[in-house]
Amino acid sequence: MIHAVYPGSFDPLHNGHLDIIRRASRIYDRLTVAVLHNPLKDRYLFDIDERVAIVNEVVKNLRGVEVDSFHGLLADYMRDIEATVIVKGLRAISDFEVELQMAHLNRQLNAELETTFIMTATRWSYVSSTRVKEIARFGANVSKLVPAATERRLRACFADPEQG
Ligand code: PNS
């Protein structure tokens, strides 16, 4: 019984994330999508409740997938929930450099951990939350890049002039 965790900011969830969630859920018995809650960072567009709500809405029909939030170190969170496998998506070499460092550090912090990588499907390899937000902020259509739950919230968010 392997319990894996797919951690991230998910600000907001896009189709590349969903691709990784679907594929990881076929590999592992149990998959927790863990949304990082960092109260010190105000750089998020969506607060923790909104980011978790989007993921919940999108994964509700996927078997073996649950959603949680965490704060502090991922290695500690993994120990707390007794999960041993970290899942990460890799889009490009630039992701790999960052992820290699994190994988080594996470293993140093918690020797039980293994980080596994899933190569993002080519069609989503250029999608990032940052670019999705940038496009949506200027009113362009992101429906091909994100699930409906994300699109709806982006629209609502940027319809509010305070957020622009
Ligand atoms: O979606 P992101 O922002 O690329 O996800 C990064 C995330 C949340 C996986 C990473 O920042 C993380 O694990 N943060 C928790 C704090 C931590 O454990 N830092 C040390 C990593 S070696």
Image: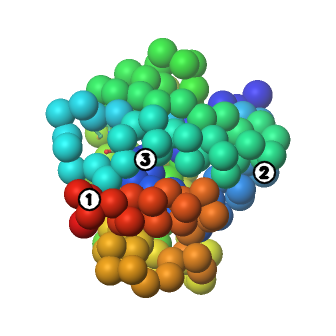
Q: Residues within 10 Å of mark 2 (few under 14, many from 20)?
A: some
Could you say which is closer to the camera, residue 136 or residue 119? 136
Q: Disc number at residue 163?
A: 1
The mark closer to the camera, 1 or 3, is 1
Relative image position of residue 94 (x, y in whole percent): 31, 72
Relative image position of residue 134 (x, y in whole percent): 31, 74
Relative image position of residue 162 (x, y in whole percent): 23, 57
Instruction: Name the image quarter holding residue 119.
Output: bottom right
Give whichever of discs 2 and 3 has the lower sequence position: 3
Give the distance between the C-alpha atoms of the residues marked 2 and 3, in whole angstroms: 19 Å
Quadrant holding the N terminus: top right
Which residue is painted at 46% across and 42% down in the image?
50
Secondary structure under tag 2 reads helix
Secondary structure under tag 3 reads strand
Give the distance between the C-alpha atoms of the residues marked 1 and 3, in whole angstroms: 23 Å
Visible residue check, residue 110: no
Which residue is painted at 43% across and 23% down in the image?
77
Q: Which residue is mark 2?
A: 26
Give whichever of discs 1 and 3 has the lower sequence position: 3
Relative image position of residue 36 (x, y in whole percent): 38, 38
Q: Residues within 10 Å of mark 3 (few under 14, many from 20)?
A: some
Mark 1 residue type: Gln
Whether label 3 lies within 8 Å of ligand 1 gets the answer yes
Could you say which is closer to the camera, residue 27 or residue 153? 153
Q: Report the side of 95 relative to 115 (left or right).
A: left
Secondary structure under tag 1 reads loop
The mark closer to the camera, 2 or 3, is 3
Report if the CB atoms under discs 1 and 3 are less than 8 Å apart. no
Mark 2 residue type: Arg
Q: Which residue is mark 3?
A: 8
Give the distance between the C-alpha atoms of the residues marked 2 and 1, in whole angstroms: 38 Å
